[in-house]
Image (tube, grey):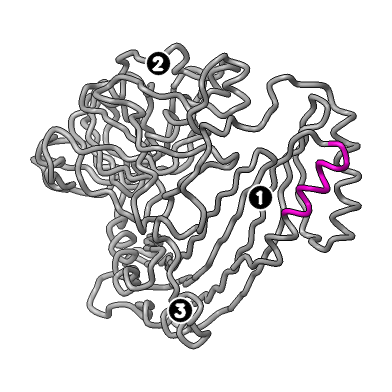
Amino acid sequence: MINSEEMQLTREALRLALAKGAQHARITLSKSSEDLVATLNGEVDRVTRCEDRSMNFALFVDGRFGSFSTNKLDPAALDRFLDQAVEMVRMLAPDEFRKLPDPQYTAANARSGQELGLCDPVYGHVTAAMRRDAALAASVWPGPADKDWKLISEEGEYADSRYDSWLIDSNGLECRHTETSFDYGVEVTVQAADGQKYSGYWWDASPIRERFDAAGVGAMALEQAAGRIGAEPAPSGRYNMVVSTEVASRLVSPILNALNAYAIQQHNSFLADSLDRKLFHEGMTLVDAPHIPGQAGSRLFDSEGLATHEMDIIRAGTVRTWFINTYMGGKMGMTPTVEGASRPRLLGWPRAGMRCSDLLELCDDGIYVTGFNGGNCDGATGDFSYGIEGFLFRGGRIVRPVGEMLVTGNFIPLWQGLLAVADDARPCMSKLIPTLAFSNVDFSG
């Protein structure tokens, strides 16, 4: 996708930045294209195509730093752009910690962009007719006729895209990432016999077209919507909580954010002073698995070129990693790791092969959360309050839908009450977080 002429132009831009006064520089050239077919009630509603190309610059000038971006990529425009950019950086305050990453920590194995098998060559042969047919074939409109509810709307989107990025810097780093994506999502609304309306959403995606199948997406969205019919709050109290893999990352993302060195250094993290401390249940093992071939989210390097690694984030409840980029490493006097988790994966526990149904049976009674509706988390304290929807279950069996409830608590006690982790994470998700079960969680209706 990025051609040799564009690579040469990027190298020339790097040379120009140094000639105009930057002591060091990093440039990321990015190109992308996306085609989308949207459907409404079983018919094509709109089609769009988007193409983008840009250069992002990190300039280090006289102990100062600035970042810039442009999509005007002809030599004359870049020459004028860099003149202004370098002069703007000179007006900033010095910052001794701004520097390029040490080459010993940068990626040396990302030369072609194809190393992780994320770019499907089929992408270039997908036609407009194929996209239309894929979108229409996934439709479930007008819905089943033998239910006590009816499908009143269906909005679907089929999209395929390709993204290519090439990063170079004045220390000689060159690394590339190329990825395709094929995805389909649908939102449906059903109307119950009493006139109440309920919505459901489902989606699927893959970098490889032959692994992508939209056929069952609409049926899953219908099941989600119909399952909400008659939802009402359960009595307030403490329950066992099972959280669907579809939304379980909501309970992991605040932990990843709190392990970011910037939040820690700014005293805005409830996991400050957490390194090598056991703060969570021993069943919690969270790893970064950024090199899984053929899975979206896998990467060999981060945005400044630091090499990603298979590594423990939390092992048996003990914090093993903070996310430290070059800048924060300098400020904190620590070795850089990587700017963030590329492909976080929560490992199953206490036994392999557990599914959602196993967790329901293990908990016996409780609330099965299938959606979060708003709410917030305080990054400094770990306190949270989220609106939820889901199901009340008794004896390991779903009894009825629940909604209009709040789940509240603090993330450290929540994870200390971990009961089990299933093995059902969906490969299409950016975070491989399976169904989770917790004990003694506060719900209010």
Q: Nearer the viewer, mark 2 or mark 1?
A: 1
**Disc on the earlier residue, 3 or 1:** 1
Magenta stretch: includes residue 161: no
Query: Magenta segment, which residues?
Result: 11-21
Chief secondary structure of the magenta portion: helix
Secondary structure of the residue carrying tag 1 is strand
Reading the image, the residue beneath label 3 is 41
Q: Position of residue 87 (x, y in %)?
A: 91, 37
Reading the image, the residue beneath label 1 is 28
**Disc on the earlier residue, 2 or 3:** 3
Residue type, label 3: Asn
Disc 2 to disc 3, C-alpha distance = 52 Å
In the image, is residue 129 above or below residue 32?
below
Q: Say the numbered circle drawn on residue 275.
A: 2
**Disc on the earlier residue, 2 or 1:** 1
Horizontal placement of 115 versus 167: left or right?
left
Q: Name the residue rendered at 65%, 32% in the picture.
A: 100
Secondary structure of the residue carrying tag 3 is loop
